[in-house]
Image: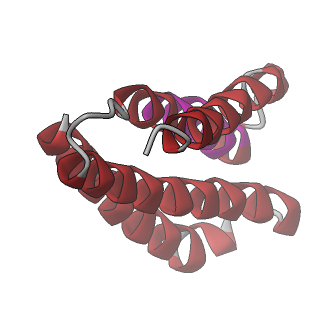
Amino acid sequence: MFKVGLISGSIFAMLSVILGAFGAHSLKNYLSEYSLSIFQTGVFYQFIHSLGILFIALLSYSIENIDFNLSIWFFILGIILFSGSLYILAVSDIKWLGAITPIGGMFFILGWLVLVIKSFKI
């Protein structure tokens, strides 16, 4: 899982920078301030959880007897559902996507919760 975490965390972090720059430079002329703030919220949470994936991957590499895989998968799902829904919502104004965003947020919370629970085993 170390390799999956390292690769996915790195890709999501890189995409955060690309999407953040895209939003700041290209979308600012096309989106309202509100939609741009929604887009930037997606970028922020994606970047934070990309770093979380990298952190957990390194943690799982150094602590071999505890399985942190579930946290990584929860963060990946959270990025896709939370940030992904915010990106699409910001550029398309499809309102029902707002119902998907909290599901992604719940995956973020579960990822951190699993990390807390697994940390008690160290």
Relative to 64, 114 lies left or right: right
Q: Is residue 45 magenta?
A: no
Does 74 sit above or below residue 45?
Answer: above
Residue bounds of the magenta highlight? 76-89
- 76 or 115: nearer the viewer: 115
Relative to 55, 6 lies left or right: left
Colour mode of the rendering = secondary structure
Q: Position of residue 25 (x, y in %)?
A: 53, 80
Does 97 sit above or below residue 21?
Answer: above
* Count of number-bearing discs: 0
Quadrant where the N terminus is found in the figure: top left
Q: Residue at x 58, y 77 (%)?
A: 24
- Whether residue 31 is visible to the viewer of this picture, yes or no, is no
- 109 or 31: nearer the viewer: 109
Q: Residue at x 73, y 64 (%)?
A: 36
Q: Residue at x 87, y 61 (%)?
A: 34
Relative to 72, 4 lies left or right: left
Predominant SS along the magenta part: helix
- Whether residue 22 is visible to the viewer of this picture, yes or no, is yes
**Quadrant of the rendered structure where residue 76 is?**
top left
Q: Position of residue 85 (x, y in %)?
A: 64, 34
Relative to 19, 84 lies left or right: right
Q: Position of residue 50 (x, y in %)?
A: 42, 55
Going by the picture, which residue comes out furthest to the bottom? 25
- 13 or 96: nearer the viewer: 13
Does 23 sit above or below residue 77?
Answer: below
Q: Position of residue 9 (x, y in %)?
A: 31, 52
